[in-house]
Amino acid sequence: MAGKKTGNQIYEVGIYCRLSKDDGTENESASIATQKSILTDYVKKQGWHLAKTYVDDGYSGTNFQRPSFQNMIKDIENGLINCVITKDLSRLGRNYLDCGLYLEVFFPEHDVRYIAVNDGVDTLNKSAMDITPFRNILNEMYAADISVKIKSAYRARFQQGKFMGTYAPYGYIKDPADHNHLLIDENVAHIVREMFDLALAGNGIAKICKYINKHHILCPAAYAAERGETAFERHIGDNVDSRYIWCENSVRNILRSPIYAGNLVGYKRVAVSMKSKKRPSKLPEDWEVIPNTHEGIVTQEEFDTVQQLMTSRRRERNAGGFENIFAGVIKCADCGFALRTMSANRRKRPDVIDCVQYSCNNYAKNGKNVCTSHNVEARDLFNAVLADINHFADMAVNDERAVRAIEKRLTETDQSKAKAMEKERKKLNKRLAELDRLFYALYEDKVMERITERNFEMMSGKYQKEQLEIEARLKEVTETLNESYEKSQGIRDFLSLIRNYQGLKELDATVINALIEKILVSEREKSADGTVRQEIKIYYKFIGFVGELHITPTKRWTALPAKCCTVCGVEYVPGSGISKYCPVCAKKMQREKSNESKRRSREQKRMACIELSAKNDRLIFSNKKGGFFGKGIRMTKC
């Protein structure tokens, strides 16, 4: 067998190098180049084969989701390497739980030998491994100590009123003389003032947002990108019109931020711990605020008044008592906006869900010029999603053939694509190696004056351009291969999860958020035979979109309980909640009411004529007594 030697094993070695920012500033011996040199020499002395070098530059040891580290794990699973070597144990990681998991579980399960050169750690040496857990604890204590020191330094500067953000908030710019101080950006400060004025006038978030959008003003991300600040283009995309569309959250964040009253605000989201990346949001009353650190765009009194107005407008529950279990999940298939709940505008029904429909929020706010209604009744959506979940749950438990068919359908394209991309990756790596050799030869030719400076610049520029293109494509290919692997794993995770929901009778928000990533609702389509269908796409967690659902929108006119006619006493089924008469008496009462209305109308006209005639008689009698008839008097005959 290749890789074996009588008496001694020749290992396929992967050397792993890691450098965090703190290591780089404190200890030059921990540099990537030094680590590579030490480990490469060690592998050569042992007579082993160096299969691959993995480098994570600028990654903390507490984070195990490092790109090269994850690539090394995948290569181990694929059997490409059977030995991992690091300079010391802390290069592997500084989280003693995860380090212990890899050293004591993952590596032994995959027959991988691990060596930390400077620490004398070797998984084949059982006595040396006894003290390894304590080394991991000490490494984590070091990371925790560094974390505490950095946080303390940041908090001290915050307490001094120094702005620590990377970018200034909308309406401000950083002081060129002191980047920890904010100055008002007069180019957009009037927009912020106008927002507060509108809020003080009693306008809600939606009205203010609509007003801003009407005046065609660049949204905060687009304005920051226009000023040359990076990392904002991804929020606005290529659509030019989207640069002028403000969302309600942007307006709300501005009106809620104490920074516009001249106060520094921080610690709105604090990490749970050093090991966790979750940063739960705090309520505004729990934010830490340092007053009077810079000039405010609005006064403190105006800001406080706006906060009171916004709080008073808050609605704790849906007015109709409907619980929107699809909140944050259901989206418009065409414009991507959320679908909002609204009344179905029909007569009262026994169940509140039958009185509610979903409609595109973009259409409701901005009209048919931007989107269409995409109406779907809550009951139709509820039934369709419940049926689809039960279908996959039953299949996962009872139908292995169908499960394999879905796995094949979802991964077949990815697997064939992955093979082609793996071949392309090898080809790209080979070409990169060739370019390195060409660069070396070209530089040697220049030094030996076998080529001119001009030719050297021309050729090196050409090779450098090709290198950049290959590296960009290599990154793209690697990301695609990682996605393919994650999708295969995701299918297994999804099937394992959905088995727990077999026989589900009711949906709630917990079930929806556990299983579904998003739901896209298309506009209704009317076919030639007059039937109406609507397409719904459910994107499940782990696997994404499997297959669309087609529902037939229904009109459910729920029968109301029987009543007795108030005229004849006969029992009948009413057509509405305010009905009082049976169908026969209803027609009779309608005729009587119509006749009565006509009689009243005729009587009113007759009385008007009598009054007018009496008035004319009084006027004529008065003129006779005076000896003449008044001019311009016209007698009217009724």
Image (tube, grey):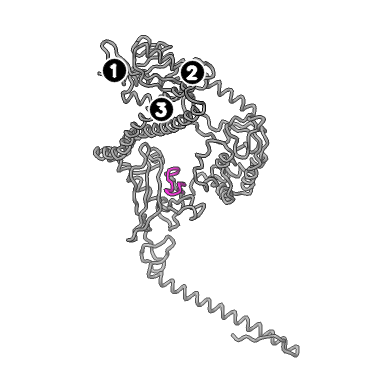
Q: Distance from label 2 to label 3 (Cα)?
A: 24 Å
Instruction: Name the residue at the right extreme.
Output: 626
| Span of residues in magenta | 326-339
> Is residue 500 visible in the rendered structure shown here?
no
Quadrant of the image containing the C terminus: bottom right
Please state which amino acid type lies under the numbered disc 2.
Answer: Ser
Q: Tell how many labels.
A: 3
Q: Regarding mark 2 in the picture, which secondary structure is present there?
A: loop
Q: Distance from label 2 to label 1 (Cα)?
A: 31 Å
Disc marking residue 410: none
Disc marking residue 432: 3
Marks 3 and 1, the one that precedes in the sequence: 1
Q: Regarding mark 3 in the picture, which secondary structure is present there?
A: helix
Q: Regarding mark 1 in the picture, which secondary structure is present there?
A: loop
Marks 2 and 3, the one that precedes in the sequence: 2
Please state which amino acid type lies under the numbered disc 1.
Answer: Gly
Identify residue for label 1. 3
Tell me where residue 153 appears, x and y as whole percent: 59, 23
Using residue 23 as the reference point, say whether residue 585 is left or right of it: left
Please state which amino acid type lies under the numbered disc 3.
Answer: Leu
Quadrant of the image containing the N terminus: top left
Check whether the beta carbons of the residues at disc 2 and disc 3 lie within 8 A of each other. Answer: no
Q: In the depicted view, which residue is nearer to us: 444 or 429?
A: 444
Q: Quadrant of residue 436?
A: top left
